[in-house]
Image (spheres, grey):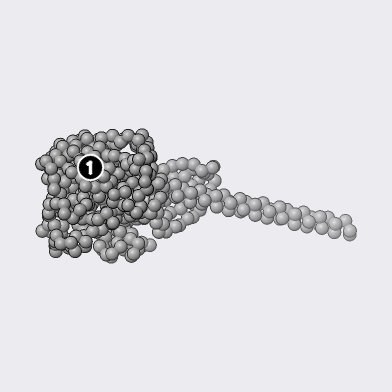
Amino acid sequence: MALPLALLLLIGLGLVASAAVFLSNTDQQVSTSYGTGNRAVAAAEAAVDHGVAELTRRARAGQDPDSVQILSDTLGTFTYTVMAYSKREHAGAGGRDFNGDGDQVDVVRYDRSFGYADAQASGAAGDQGKPVKLLVAVATDGRSQAEVRTEVARDRLNPHLESPLSLNSPSDAVLNGSFSVDGRLYTRNGVLVSSSSLTPAYGATAASKTAAKGDCNYWKPGVKIPVEGALDLAGSMMSVGHTSFDHGTGENYDAEDSLNTFKFTPEEVLGVEPGDLDAYRKDASAVTDFRNLSGINYVTSGSIPSQISGSGILIIHNPRYDVKKYDCTNFPSTCEPGYSNDAANQPLTLRINANGNFNGIIITDELVRLNGNFAMLGGLISLTTDQVNIPANGSGSLKWSCEAVNDAAEQASAYGIRLSWEHRVL
């Protein structure tokens, strides 16, 4: 009897061992699958981060990808792709009609104050009305696949220009020639905005000018920019609207600002924190083509060519050039003796001396020439307090355009606001 019992016991132990091995293998397979899935999700999340950086790069280059693949790359054993879509309203199942009009074509917009907004910016305070982008990243290694979706909006750069302006400088400048400087309001396409469509008028009083300052969206209904002479000019240059050169009140031009409030660094002009523009600094030789500019180009050294074209924000600035240390006449309490004699502290100069077209913002340490048939829409700021005699020959023009300035700021803004995050293993 002992032998059959022993055999039965051995068979039972064998079954238990087999079950243990089976369960162990199953656990290992589950663990392996779970780990592979997690790695796939991690790769897809990394792909989204790469996609946000690529989306920002394209936006700063003036591109607006919609329903297209913006990148394909690898991470370890995983390959991934990222698609970019303009987020649109939809009233169907599982969707949301943000403005209640049932239109599935509207692009969803976002502002900090109110969250999602409809396709038309509300105009309320703080409303940025910037389109929302949906990024879809898929990562796979052939065994496991994951997808991550995220909605992003731009963390918009808000330039604090002392608007309205077309040409602004704290120096006692003399402009001569036949260049046209126009501080009236133009669209991004160079069309003069009719004053009859902008009411009531700010007027030309000091109080009304103060009210207009800093309002880069003053082209909205309800605002009118007065047309008035702005500079006492030599030669045949034509100037209308607000063109600001700031010096003594007895001089015959429109002093929009004072040296106490003038913004003397690119960061101050654009309303960003010190250091926020450091990543864009480069030598002039690193700019691919000054005749086809886009996004932010911050030139801190080198030789700047005389032909400028393109769009965006162009900065010509020596970071060591500090007007308040350099100019002992106007800033006796902050100037440093000998500072202006040091070659390392000299301003970078901009000499526009050829045909070209530019839309956006140009900030330079010292503007010394405006020759040629150069046409610009936006704002041109010279930071020097030195007296400059600017030749302005040719038949070029500089026209104030808030839309061009906003477009330049839009190009410079990064996609930094994450609105949603969803991931799944496929």
**What residue do we see at 14% from left, 60% from top?**
204
Choose between 169 and 164: the one closer to the eye: 169
Q: Which residue matches tag 1?
A: 388
Residue at point 85%, 57% (across, down): 6
Instruction: Name the one closer to the observer, 66 or 174.
Output: 174
* Residue at image coords 24%, 55%: 258
Mark 1: secondary structure: loop
Amino acid carrying label 1: it is Val
The spot of residue 160 in percent (x, y) is 29, 55
| Residue 312 seen | no
Q: Is residue 309 above or below residue 9?
A: above
The correct choice, above or below, for 338 with respect to 226 in the image is above
Q: Position of residue 30 (x, y in %)?
A: 61, 53
As drawn, which residue projects farthest toward the right?
Answer: 2
Q: Position of residue 174 (x, y in %)?
A: 18, 43
Q: Quadrant of residue 395?
A: top left
Query: Which image quadrant for residue 318?
Result: top left
Task: Please provide percent x and percent y for residue 235.
Answer: 11, 41
